[in-house]
Image: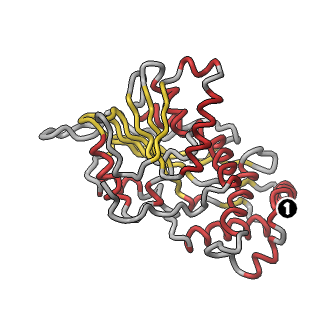
């Protein structure tokens, strides 16, 4: 089946630098996503479809959750991301941890038009719905790939939490540049906050929700590099949709050196950088003719990420 329209372009592209940024992002948000998926009900023996898998970070997390009797198929349209995912899969196969994880495969396909041999037990995805022109319709069509009573769980970011407290001149300019570039590029900054409503629009009854916001100061090994990477990817290219006000660009100066300068500035101001909130919503695929209760109640996550503490 041919798609009705071309797949939406991924705003940040798929260059090697962006793949590096995604791996850094996965280190910060990986524990958050893993706990949310387990809280939603992802467990041993399940057959899972990871929609918009990218470099495979969520696919590998799901494989650990389903164990050796389960399987996970990661699907994406980007050949560059899938090449990296398959290379990582080959590397993982040589590690002791691979023995306790489910089987993994990666497929290139245009969602939601993929055809499966059989319905899956769980449909999952991270940071995929916010890139769709009509996310409710996209999600509605994907749910047809899940067996009745199966799990549907998605995670999106709410970028409204992104800020430094107290704000400092350079960090404020960088964050404004990121925010404006997302807006100008058509990215939904509030996709996470609207995820519950999106499930309802897609005909799903949410069974649970969770929200986690990583944060860290100048000493944090993840939040500053990730923020600097994101700014450079979004704003420092000549083709960027928006590069921020002239005054902010003057404050920022050379994008290649912003990480070190932000660290000095945040340390001097005793400031903390609060990252986008990861919001997860899950539901149970409908059984025809039957109203389904929620599989599990939603509780806000409380944990420590590798990057430090979190705010809720």
Left or right: 164 with respect to 261?
left
Percent x, y of residue 113 = 34, 51
Q: Position of residue 250 (x, y in %)?
A: 81, 77
- For residue 37, above or below residue 155: above
Q: Where is mark 1, residue-wise?
A: 257
Q: Is residue 258 visible?
A: yes
Name the foreground residue: 212 vs 269: 212
At a point 33% along the width and 48% down the height, the residue shown is: 142
- Residues 19 and 272: in front is 19
Rendered view: 123 above or below 77 = above
User: How would you rate the neighbour count of disc 1 (Cα within 10 Å): few for under 14, some for 14-19, many for 20 or more?
Assistant: few
Which quadrant holds the N terminus? bottom left
The answer, for residue 280, to whether it is visible in the render is: no
Color theme of the render: secondary structure
Q: Nearer the viewer, residue 168 or 285?
A: 285
Q: How many marks?
A: 1
Q: Residue at x 30, y 35 (%)?
A: 117
View extreme (bottom): residue:
246
Q: Outermost residue toward the left? A: 289
Q: Is residue 95 left or right of residue 155?
A: right
Tell me: 311 left or right of 169: left
Spot occupied by residue 308 in the image (x, y as percentages of width and height): 70, 41
User: Which residue corresponds to the image point at 66% horizontal and 61% vertical from the top-left?
Assistant: 163
Residue drawn at 76 percent across, 64 percent down: 171
Horizontal and vertical percent position of residue 147: 26, 35
Q: Secondary structure at mark 1?
A: helix
């Amino acid at each position: 089946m041919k798609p009705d329209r071309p797949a939406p372009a991924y705003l940040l592209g798929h260059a090697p630098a962006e793949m590096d940024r995604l791996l850094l992002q996965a280190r910060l948000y990986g524990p958050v996503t893993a706990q949310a998926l387990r809280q939603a009900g992802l467990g041993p023996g399940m057959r899972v479809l990871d929609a918009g898998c990218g470099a495979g970070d969520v696919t590998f997390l799901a494989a650990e959750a389903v164990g050796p009797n389960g399987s996970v198929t990661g699907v994406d349209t980007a050949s560059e991301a899938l090449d990296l995912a398959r290379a990582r899969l080959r590397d993982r196969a040589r590690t002791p941890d691979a023995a306790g994880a489910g089987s993994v495969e990666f497929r290139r396909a245009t969602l939601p038009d993929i055809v499966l041999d059989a319905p899956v037990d769980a449909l999952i995805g991270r940071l995929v719905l916010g890139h769709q022109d009509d996310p409710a319709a996209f999600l509605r069509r994907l749910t047809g790939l899940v067996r009745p009573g199966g799990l549907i769980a998605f995670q999106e970011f709410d970028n409204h939490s992104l800020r430094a407290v107290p704000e400092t001149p350079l960090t404020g300019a960088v964050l404004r540049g990121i925010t404006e570039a997302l807006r100008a590029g058509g990215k939904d900054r509030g996709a996470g906050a609207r995820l519950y409503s999106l499930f309802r629009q897609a005909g799903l009854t949410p069974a649970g929700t969770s929200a986690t916001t990583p944060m860290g100061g100048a000493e944090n090994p993840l939040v500053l590099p990730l923020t600097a990477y994101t700014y450079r990817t979004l704003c420092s290219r000549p083709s960027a949709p928006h590069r921020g006000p002239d005054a902010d660009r003057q404050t920022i100066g050379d994008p290649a050196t912003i990480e070190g300068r932000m660290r000095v500035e945040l340390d001097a101001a005793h400031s903390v950088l609060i990252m986008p909130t990861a919001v997860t919503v899950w539901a149970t695929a409908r059984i025809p003719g039957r109203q389904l209760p929620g599989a599990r109640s939603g509780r806000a996550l409380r944990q420590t990420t590798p990057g430090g503490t979190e705010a809720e």
